[in-house]
Image: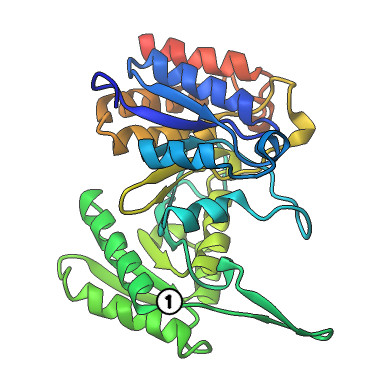
Amino acid sequence: MINNIPTVTLLEGDGIGPEITSSVVKIIEASGVKINWEKMLAGKNAYEKYGSVLPDVTISSIEKNKIVLKAPITTPIGHGFSSVNVALRRHFDLYANVRPSKNMKGVVTPFNNVDLVVIRENTEDIYAGLEEKVDEDRIHGIKLITKKGSTRICDFAFQYALKNNRHEVTVVTKANISKLADGLFLNCFREVAKKYPEIKTREILVDNLCMQLVVNPAQFDVMVMPNLYGDIVSDLCAGLIGGLGLAGSANVGTNCAIFEAVHGSAPDIAGKNIANPTGLLKSAIEMLKYINKNDEALKIQHALEETISEGKILTSDLKGNASTTEFTDEIIRKMSI
């Protein structure tokens, strides 16, 4: 914080990352919010400069500022360096991943009444990557579920419901099969729920949930679940509203929060000025709410929704032919009306 102006660590990522980051920063500045942006490197670009995908200088910046806006960073599949996302979540104990999915006017989807939130435990489970090679024919993947981790994510989900005027929290497990690990998560949910009698609760198995989501997603409000299920279900929910390009997210810990687009770095369209910045912009809107810039967040949200619902200036993924720059400028123009 400098002269009451928040300082935010800015990770531009790679691929289309720098383009959509530039767009989002421009929109935020046009809204009237003053932020000191501290640009840092992570991922491939950081490795080329520092020999590390998550260099100490970047870690220090995040530790100091405690707020991050992060564009996509490429993670190689099956080889190369490990996920920067996972490393950040572990280092800063960002235990809660928040993924809202809500329909936007102008985006045609099979459903027009989706308004739900996935609260995903972010540090444990299979997704933590705890694997060991037993021999040439066997690999053990460890599903880590703890009482502490399960209790705090369930409590976070109920707190989120209260703060955002939500009325039901559904716990998602596979406790009929994973009786010990998912059973622990489920029992922690039941205990936490006793503290929130005003919030309705529901229990569902993850396979049934996936079926129900593509039949009637409007029946769900807030859903809380272990890490791996959350990774899969949150992408499914993004598909219900038009795809990952329209989905934002927050990774929240006790003393730090990282707001990031959930889609990939799309290197095939990098540098062409055609990328849609909406996912990162939605993440930035959540960041503004986090730093109590609610009026400006709402201002940007309305301008984004009006731009998309009007349908005149849209990027190609939204069946338009506008450039990233043109889409950005239209959102800014609508904020000034």
User: How is the rendered protein coloured?
Assistant: rainbow
Residue 152 shown left or right of residue 83 in the figure: left
In the image, 100 versus 111, the foreground residue is 100
In what quadrant of the picture does the N terminus appear? top left
Q: Residues within 10 Å of mark 1 (few under 14, many from 20)?
A: some
Residue 106 seen from this side: no
Q: Amino acid at mark 1?
A: Ile
Q: What's the residue at 35%, 59% (across, down)?
A: 222
Q: Find residue 219 and report its image quarter.
A: bottom left
User: In which image quadrant can residue 95 be found?
Assistant: bottom left
**Residue toward you, 53 or 278:** 53
Q: Is residue 50 visible?
A: yes
At x 50%, y 77%, the residue is: 144
Residue 69 shown left or right of residue 43 in the figure: left
Residue 148's x, y, as percent?
33, 74
Q: Nearer the viewer, residue 11 or 282?
A: 11
Question: What percent of the width, then of the height, locates residue 315?
Answer: 64, 24
Which residue in the structure is indicated by mark 1? 204
Residue 102: name its quadrant. Answer: top left
**Point 24% across, 58% down: residue:** 159
Figure quadrant of the C terminus: top left
Residue drawn at 25 percent across, 18 percent down:
3
Q: Is residue 272 above or below residue 96?
A: above
Residue 92 pos. (x, y %):
43, 53
In the image, 294: left or right of 267?
left
Against 269, residue 312 (above or below) is above
Identify whether 292 is placed above or below 214: above
Residue 246 lies, in percent from the top left, at 54, 39
- At mark 1, the secondary structure is strand
**Count of numbered circles on the image:** 1
